[in-house]
Amino acid sequence: MIDRTTVQKILDTARIEEVVGDFVTLKRRGVNYIGLCPFHNEKTPSFTVSPAKNICHCFGCGKGGSPVNFIMEHENLSYVDALRYLAKKYRIEIVEKELTKEEMDKRNDRENMLAANKFALEFFENTLNDTDEGRNIGMAYFRERGFRDDTIKKFCLGYSPDSFEALGKAATKAGFSRKTLVDVGLCIENQRGGLTDRFRGRVMFPVHSISGQIVAFGGRVLKKTENTGKYVNSPESEIYHKSNELYGLYFAKNAIQRNDVCYLVEGYADVISMHQAGIENVVASSGTSLTTGQIRLIHRFTSNIIVLYDGDAAGIHASIRGIDMLLSEGMQVEVLLLPDGEDPDSFARSQDSTQFVDFINRNKTNFISFKTNLLLSEAGNDPIKRASLIGDIVDSISVIPDKIQQAIYIRECASKFSMREEVLVQEVAKRQKSKISGETQATQNSILEKQTIEQHNAYPVAYKEERQLLRYIIRHGLEPIEIQSNGETVQISVLDYIAGSIEADDIPLQYPIHIQMLEEALQQDGDLRSYFLNHPDVTIQNYAFSLSEDKYEKSALYETKERESERLNRLSGEVRTIMFEYRFALVKERCAELRREIETASTAGQTDRVDELLQELKEATEERKQISAVLGNRK
C-alpha cells in the first residue's frame, strides 16, 4: 500500500499541463492551454487545461479532471496504478506501508506469475526468430497468414518448440518455481512428477491485460493430430480471468476512444489482420461467449459497438445471444455481415483501412434489421413462426435500459411488421415485469443486499459513516477542497481525498454497494451524480437517488449567494470531519474487539497473547483519543 505522505507528495507534484502534454499538443490561450481532446474525435480544439486549478476539461465530451483522473481515464488505470504512473514520471520514490504476511504472499505470487509469463513471452519470441524450428514452422505460418514483421513484433507473436519440457527447463533454470509455472498455466504436472510444456509445438498469441501486462497465452497447433484442439489457452489463474479480458484491447483502447466505436470479432487473427490493415479499434472475445465483464470493459471507452460476422449461419445463431447482452449493458449495437466465404481476417487482408471502413459504413445495420433478415427467411409465411420472431425481437428491446432508445426501436419494429406501437409497448412492459418478478435469489443477494441487511440490522461496522462518504462522493466528488500538505494549503478533489485516505490508511469500505460505487466513481470524470442516477443497474440508481436526497441540504439560492471561499472552507471542513468520523467508528470497534479477545485469551491462560493484545489496545485507544480530540472529545 502506498503510504499517505507519498500519495500527497504525488498529488502535490503532478502538474496537469505536464501530464496532459505527454499525450496532447497544447497551445496557450490566455491563462489556460487548449488542444484536441484525446477522448473523442474533434477538428476544433475544445480540451482545456487549467494550470491554476490543476484540472482539465473537454467541452465536447465532458471528460477531464485532475492529473490522477486524466491518467486513470487515458491509460485506463486504477487509482493506485495512476499514482504509480505519476510517481515514475516525477521520479518520486514510492514508500509503502508494511503488508501483512498474507498480503505479501499474495502479491509475491501475482508478481511471480507475471514475471513467468514475461519470461515465457521472450522465450517464445526468441524461439520464433532465432531457431530453425521457429523460423521453418512458426514464422512460415505467420507469413502464410500475411503478417508483416512489424505486426509480429507489435503483438509479440512467438512459437513454442515441439518439446515436452523446453520451456519448463529454461524457466526453472532461470529461477522460477514449479508451483509458479503450473499455477500460471505454462506447464502441467505429468504422472511422473515432472513438468510438461502446455503449449508445445504451437504458434503463440500473448494476451495483454488492459495495462499491457502478459496475463495469458493462446497457442494454435499446426500439426493435424487426432484428439487435439486447434487452440489451447491459459487456464484461469490469479492474474487471468478470461471473462474479464478481451484480446487486443490494450492495443485498441486509444483508437476506440478516438473513433468512439469498437469492432468486435471472434479470433486472434481477425484482430491482427484488421490492425495490419490500419483498423485498430478492434477486439476479440477469443472464441468464447461474450461476457458482461468483457462488455463493460468496452463500455469504458465507447457506447458504440459493431459486431462483425462471417457468412457462417450456424456461428451467427450461436453467438447472437451476445447482442442482447450488449443491449442490456446500454451499448448502441450495430451488426455487419461479411460477404460469403469471408471472415474479418481474410477480408482485412484484401482491403485497406479506407475500403474496409467504407464497406462497414455502407453495410452495417441495427440489430432489429439484422435479426429480422436472419430469422424471417426461416419463418416464411408461417404466422406462428412470424409471431415467435417478433417475440424474439421484443425480448431484445425489453432489455435496453434507455427508454428513449427503446421507444425508437419499438417504432422501427412496428413499422417493419405493420403493427401498432401500443401493442409492442405493452409486450415490452410485460416482459420487463416478468424479468423483475423472476429475479433469482442470487441476483437479489448481489451487490445491493439492501433489503436483507436492513431487515436483520446486519450493517457493517461504520455503515453510516461509509454512507456519508458515498453521499459526498456523489454530490461533490470532483469539486475541490483544501488540505494541508507540508505546511502548505493545496487543493484536491473530494473523490481523490476520500479514495486516497482510504487507500493510504488501509481502511477499506465494507458495504458491497459502497465498494462498487467507489470503484466506478474513480473511473469517471464527469458528473458523478448524473452517472449514478443513470446507472444501468436499477438498484444502484435507486441507492444513488437516496443518497442524493437531503431535506436539510442548503437551498440552491443559498448556494449561489455563498462566496466561493466560504463554500470551499465549508466543504473542506465537512469532508475532513466525515473522514475522521469514519476512522473513529473503525477504531472504536477495534478497541471493543480487542477487549473481547483479551477476555478470551485471559480465560484460556494465554499470558503472552494477553500482553500482545494489551499493547495493541493501548495503541488503538491512543489513536481513538487523538481522533476524538479532533471531533470534539467524542466518546
Image: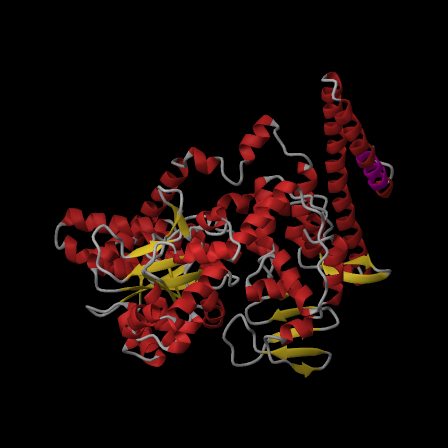
Q: Nearer the viewer, residue 163 or 403?
A: 163
Residue under the image location 34 percent in, 69 percent down: 134
In the drawing, does residue 132 fall left or right of residue 496? left
Q: Relative to residue 96, is residue 306 depicted above or below?
A: below
Residue under the image location 49 percent in, 38 percent down: 446
Q: Relative to residue 194, is residue 364 depicted above or below?
A: below
Can the viewer see residue 428? yes
For the stretch drawn in magenta, the main secondary structure is helix
In the drawing, does residue 583 fall left or right of residue 134? right
Q: Nearer the viewer, residue 420 or 604?
A: 604
Q: Considering the image in quadrants, where does the C terminus appear?
A: top right
**Residue furthest left in the image:** 381
Q: Nearer the viewer, residue 155 or 57?
A: 155
In percent of width and height, residue 182 lies at 44, 48
In the drawing, does residue 354 fall left or right of residue 29? left
Can the viewer see residue 534? no
> What stretch of residues is rendered in magenta?
620-628
Q: State the image quarter where residue 583 is shown.
A: top right
In percent of width and height, residue 31 lies at 73, 79
In percent of width and height, residue 77 lies at 57, 60
In the drawing, does residue 264 fall left or right of residue 118? left
Q: Nearer the viewer, residue 525 or 503?
A: 503
Is residue 439 one of those drawn in magenta?
no
Q: State the image quarter where residue 127 is shown.
A: bottom left
